[in-house]
Structures are given as C-alpha cells and as structure tokens.
Image (cartoon, rainbow, N blue to C red):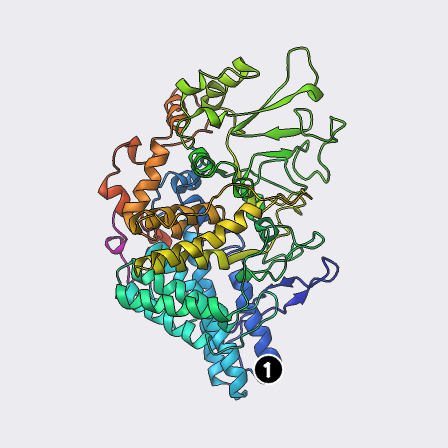
Amino acid sequence: MKKIAYGILLLAAGLFTTSCLDEDPQYSQNSKIIFSNEENAELALLGCYGYMTANGAYGQMWQEVPLVGSGLAWGQRNGGDENGLASLAVVPGNGLVSSTWKGMYKVIAEVNAFIESMEASSLDETVKTQKLGEARFLRAIAYYNLVSLWGDVPLKLVASSSDGIAMPRTDRVTIFGTIVDDLKAATNISATSSVGRLNSWAAKAFLGKVYYKMAMLDIDRAANLNNAKTMFDDVYEHADYELEPNLNSLFVPYTQAGAVTNSKEAIIQLNFNAESGVCYNRGSNRFAPQASTSGINWGTYRATRYAYDLHYGTYPGDPRVETNFLTQWRARSSNNQPNPKDPVRTDGQLCPGDSVYTYPKRLYKPEGGTDADAVVLTLPYELFADKTNPTQAELNNYTGDYQNIVKGMWTNFTQVGNSEKWPYLAKLYDQGQSAQYAHKHLIVFRYAEMLLLMADVYNELDQKDRAIDLVNEVLARARKSIPLNSTTSYEASQPADWSKSLTKEQVTEKLYFERLFELMGEPSLYDMVRIRGTKYMELLLLKNNNHNITAATDANYATNANNFADRLFDSGQKDALSEHFLKKNLLLPIPSSEIDANSALTNADNNYGY
C-alpha cells in the first residue's frame, strides 16, 4: 500500500483574531502507515483535508472549471482550453478538465489509504468512528463532484499504488449509493466541529442535497424527494445554521478585522493560508481584473453580460448584484503593486485617473475637463421594457443628461477589442491578494443553498406555500445586505417576497433562476445550471443567445482580430437549442489523459457527444 506522510494543520497566528487553518499536505514514498496513536491519525486526516484544498481541487480547478463551464462566465475566444469551457464546446483533451478530474481522484486516493490504515489500527472505536466518518465525508464530496460533472465514473474504494489502474466506469446509481453510505457514516461523528472541519449536521445537510440530486435524475424520485425532506427538515429544525444578516460578510478576506471564519451559514467550508506553498486559494488570481489587487491577476475570466442583466433586470436594486458582480475598482499601475493609485478627487470618488469601470457603467470625462470632472454613466435600465435585455432602439430614445454619450454606450459596449467591457465575478475578488494567493476561505455548501433546495423539494411534494416561505427567508436577507464599505443600514425593495398566488410550475422555474442569483460565482454554479436537466438549461442559455448586446458583439467579432468578445451557444440558435448540444453539455467528457492511462476505458466509453 502507498504511504502518505500527511501535513500538520497549522494555526496561522497573527493573520486574524481567530485561527486560520493551513491544510497543507506533504508527500513521501514509504509503503505502509501504522496509526500507533490518535495524534498521528489526526495528522493523516488533516492531510486528507489538505488535498481537498490543493491546486487540482478547490484551491483552483474546482473553482475555475465549474464557474467557467457553467455558461455564465467566459474567457478569451482564442484562449484554447478556457475558450472551450466558456463556449460549452469542451473536447476530451482539455487540460483544465483533466486537472479537475485528477484533483478529485487525488482526494479519493488519499482518503482510501487513510481509511484502510485507520480500519487496521487498534485505536479506540470512538476515535475510529469520528475520523473514519470525516474521511468518508470527504470522499462523498469528491464523488458527488465527479458524478455531477461526469456521470458514470470509475469507483475506487481501495488504496492503490498506481494511478493508472484499469477500472471501467461505474453506473452513477451505484456511485450515489456509495455517497449515501459514506454520508450516513458521517452522521455518527460529532455534531460540532472546529473551523474548517466537518460535523454530523453538515453530513445530514449534504445528504439532503444528494437525495435531491438523485430525485432530479429520476433515481427513485418519490422516495428520494422524501429522503431529502427528512434530512433538510432535521437540519432546519435542530441544527444551529442560520443566514448571516449581511450576505457580504461571507466573502471577505480573512485578514480583515471582523471577518467571518466560522460563519453559521457555512455548512462545508474549506480554509486556506496565503503563506502555504501547496494549498492556497487562486480564485482571485484567475478571476480578478489585471492590476486590481496587490498581487498578480490575469483577468482570465469575466462574467457574461447576459448574467448581469438577467439578475439586475429581474430584481432592480437587489444588493446581491453588487455582491455578485465587480464593476468598479481602484486601479494599480501594474500587477504586484502594494497600493492602488492615489484618489484624484477630493471626495474619494472613483474617476478615470485612478479607477476602472466596467459594464454596465462607463466613465465620461467632459471635453476640456480633468479626470476629477468625470462622471459615471450607467445604462438607463428604467428605459427598457425588458430590463434583462436592453435594445439599441430603446437606448436611442434616451433624453436625459449626457444624451449623446449614453446613446453611444451601445456602440462602445458592442465594439470588439476593449477587454474592460464585462463585469467580473466579485465573490472571488481579494484586493489585498498576496502574489497569486487570495486571503479568502471558500464556502462549498451554505445554508442559503440548502434552503433553496429544500424549497424545491417542498414544491415537488405539492407544498408550494411552504416552499415560498423558505425562499422568502433568503430574499429577506438579500434585501438587508449592504456593501462592505457602507456603514448605513437599509433595506432595499428588491428582491421582493414571492406571492403565494404563484403556481407550482412558476415556483419551479423561479427557483431555478433564484439559485443562480444567490450562488453566482460559487462552486455550485455548474451543478445548479444542470440540476433540472436540459429543459431549464435551455431556458437559461437561450437568454444568452437572445441578449441583444451579446448578439451584437458576437456579430462584430468576425471583423476584428481581438479576442475579447462574447459568444453565442450552439451556432447562435435563438428559438431552440439542439437536443444534441443540450444533452452533450449536461456532462463533461472523460479526459483523454484518463482514457490513455486506464486500459479499461476507450474513446467509445466517453459521455454522449464526445
């Protein structure tokens, strides 16, 4: 058996008032582990947590691939693997997909080794129940991720010294059975845990999500809806989870005073330390604009403009729009600059001399004026009959201040070539980033997501009014959320509570989109886009193809060699996407690297369409 020498979980003293966990595994090459005492078993378990935060897992790839492949973000059109993900045109040889696959299987390999050694140890049964339960919980998360992105995958439950072991794909029903068994074992662990560790209430909440997912895949649908309800009800009625009063408090750097490190909303949270050389958070590095933080940013990915307009147009004034989308920031002269540019205006407001604005905003400096005289103009959404989809004809009717400049925003936004015409995903942004590393923890599963899944379960079980009550809990918190730099408490008018007059079918559709609004820029996004199959995924993706600004930008791309531009899905179909395209994009392809290494797989074994 392969031995792993696991890293010690360090307290990052001095980073903030409570400890940050540095889950930092180390590697060695011996052949066997003997857990002679609880302390070395604990170190080994913490190493398993560490692999879940490594670069191939949630340290980078399990943020990057689920977000970019969701259909709600994009990379440069000549960006190779990135473009394939964003265009929903992935090929089996995509390197990002391969790294993401390997990242979760690395977690599984290390957990399997830990489980075998733990079961063979002579440690106290209470200790074994706790540590085996946590390890099996980690394996359940890994397999849920794999089955959500790839469907049938090889089911590896024993430790192996070879990554290239021949193993065919296992039916996803069997894999879900393993996930359920692992999570049931995890329900026997402690009901409380330290920062960054798993507990039995988290196992029950995640088990509810698994049952819901199985029901949506028509795996024993009726039974699993009731199973999900049982788990969610237990957590709702007895656990200590609750919504944070301010959504923005969940996405702050942990070095800031008062930052949340063990929020009551976080069901599964992974913690990072920017000083770690192995397990660090690269979300800000990959998704933040260039020269927007004190570290290194590539601005590789942006949010789509149809995603911004869909959210803003559905709920004008929703504070979550600012939580989800970064549209302004204080500029730096280049990457790796410790401080942003000094404010030009005496009132500290951002202006062209010190800051950058993106869609749907534009900075305008009057002729003959200075940077300090600039004004911020925003698309006049009040003018549009459908606020989720502005039109050029409506914009041409604008008669307010700076009339010609506002009318010219259409041409400005649809010209290809300016990379700063798209919003960014704000939850990943860390202004105080160190080199490539963000000072942010990552919430993988939180209470708001559970409430919205729970609402869907109740709606499916014909308890629509209860479903609406659960949704309204999430909406009420959203209305009260305020920007981090604000000291003024207020309550917005949007998102307004849902009416009990809605039909069951209307609640189903609204819940689908509500989860996207609430979870924009979080790792669950890929799963939430596809969790109700092709029908609702088509509803979403057609909004991109019919988004007027997106379509106009795409039309201009052929006349300009610059690679910054939106794209349309499935050759720009506007009325209906092809069944082939939709079915193919329910899952990613099994990576070519796995097929080459695993003699039990061939190209013919790949997912539909690949």
Question: Camera-side residue: 180 or 169?
Answer: 180
Across and down, in percent, residue 158 comes to: 40, 74
Residue 121 spot, x, y in % from top left:
51, 85
Identify residue type, mark 1: Glu
> Callout 1: helix, strand or loop?
helix
Asked if residue 534 can be seen in this view, the reply is yes
Q: Residue 572: x, y in percent?
A: 30, 31
Displayed quadrant of residue 233: bottom left
The answer to if 600 sits in the magenta stretch is: yes
Closer to us: 6 or 507: 507
Q: Nearer the viewer, residue 138 or 269?
A: 269
Q: Residue furthest front?
A: 501
Relative vertical location of residue 364 with respect to residue 41 in this rendering, above or below: above
Residue appearing at x 70%, y 51% in the figure: 256
Answer left or right for 349 relative to 467. right
Which residues are drawn in magenta? Answer: 599-610
Q: Is residue 377 left or right of residue 229?
A: right
Q: How many marks?
A: 1
Q: Nearer the viewer, residue 340 or 54?
A: 340
**Residue 404: where, in percent of width, then height?**
52, 13
User: Is residue 138 shown to the viewer in this render?
Assistant: no
- Confirm whether the magenta stretch covers residue 308: no
- 482 over 384 or under it: above or below: below
For residue 48, above or below residue 548 = below
Indicate the quadrant where residue 323 lies.
top right
Q: Report the magenta stretch's main SS.
A: loop
How crowded pointer 1 is (Cα within 10 Å; few <14, some 14-19, many 20+) is rated as some
Q: Residue furthest right?
A: 346
Residue ID for mark 1: 38
Quadrant showing the N terminus: bottom left
